Image (cartoon, helix red, strand yellow):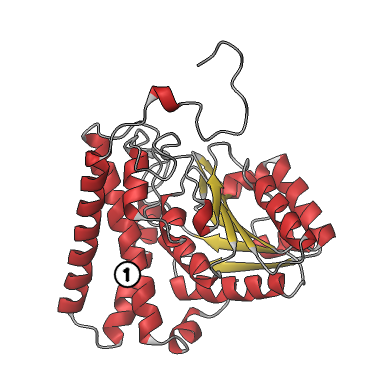
Amino acid sequence: MFAPNPTMAATETDTETLSRLYRELLRIRRAEEGILELLLKNKLSSTMCHVSIGQEAVAVGVCDALEPDDYITSTHRGHGHFLARGGAMSALMAELMGREAGACRGRGSSMHLVDASIGHLGSNAIVGGHIPIATGAALWTALRGEHRVVASFFGDGATSEGIFHESVNFAAVQRLPIVFVVENNQWAMSLPWAKSTAQQSIEVKAEGYGIAGVDVDGQDVLAVRTAARDAIGRARRGEGPTLLGLSTYRFLGHSRADPSSYRDKAEEEKWRLRDPVLLAHNLLMAHDFDEEWFEQVDRDIAAEIAAAIEIAENSPPASIGEVFSDIYATPLEGIR
């Protein structure tokens, strides 16, 4: 059963908050549409590019509930997390295009985004590989007596990895200030959620660890935000971790090369009716927002993306001569 009630969340949310959330949903959607266009034009530094179109409410709802000093870790499908956390559009575009103006100076590309200045401790190409990093960050902040909370985003496929269990179990025992965000888009590449686990409820799974768990409609940004605020509040009060199960859907294939022929088209259409951008749009329409307002938001976002791409294209490419800069290890002797 999904919780909290999205209708109740809508009535308790002011239009300023709702309009802000809508802008961010659309901003991520348009950014990733633009990224796909750049990919088709062969302007990205790598063909490995995974978009989160259809899943935007997860990133927006959770990140909106965080405080500026909190941390997140992200996945190979992490453009939305980066932007929702406050990452600059130009830093994202330049990174994907392999330019020095990128968040990692063009060295990380799509699957390795990092920006410590906004509390983004990194996305990771290894399924579940960032979950122990988030757990370690939560341990560190707890040992220092800080009040920071860590939100770790990962997909349903990562819940089948051993490191997921080890991290959640350790965090539960230590009552660490972390929220494990299960971004369940129903498919671990071509493996459906129903065939990858005997217990599909994240709330029930959490009981085995002795921690809070909740199943939430991940397409409803208000429901996500409300559940995230509750989980973050528990963590900040020293009440331990939460398993936050957000049911969502990727509208496109696993990557650009995946036509997702393994999915039923009726299923895809059903989920498209639950488009998080559309749902937020309809709520605002119910609050008497007119089409001119929506069109202006779209124009503003288009201008931001165009300016970001221009900045990226005018930035020099990442240099092979700087490949060993900004790393912690000393290069091996003779390798330059």
The location of residue 138, given as percent across then percent down, is 71, 57
Is residue 62 positioned above or below 102 on the image? below
Q: Quadrant of residue 180 in the image? A: bottom right
The residue to which callout 1 is attached is 23
Is residue 179 positioned above or below 330 on the image? below
Residue 143 as seen in the image, left or right of residue 120: right
The location of residue 76, given as percent across then percent down, is 49, 42
Q: Using a 10 Å C-alpha cutoff, classify the residue at mark 1 as few (fewer than 14 neighbours), some (14 to 19) or many (20 or more).
A: many
The location of residue 5, given as percent across then percent down, is 53, 80
Residue at image position (36%, 83%) is: 16
Between 322 and 301, the residue placed more toward the observer is 322
Residue at image position (41%, 51%) is: 52
Which type of secondary structure does the marked residue at label 1 adopt?
Answer: helix
Which quarter of the rendered picture does the N terminus lie within?
Answer: bottom right
Residue 121 as seen in the image, left or right of residue 19: right
Which residue is at the far right?
173
Q: Amino acid at mark 1?
A: Arg
Residue at image position (83%, 59%) is: 174
Between 34 and 268, the residue placed more toward the observer is 34
The location of residue 96, given as percent across then percent down, is 35, 39
Q: Quadrant of residue 288 in the image? A: bottom left
| Residue 248 appears in the figure | yes
Q: Quadrant of residue 151 in the image? A: bottom right
Is residue 43 positioned above or below 157 on the image? above
Residue 286 as seen in the image, left or right of residue 212: left
Which residue is at the far left?
292
Is residue 2 positioned above or below 131 on the image? below
| Residue 2 appears in the figure | no
Q: How many marks?
A: 1
Residue at image position (35%, 58%) is: 28
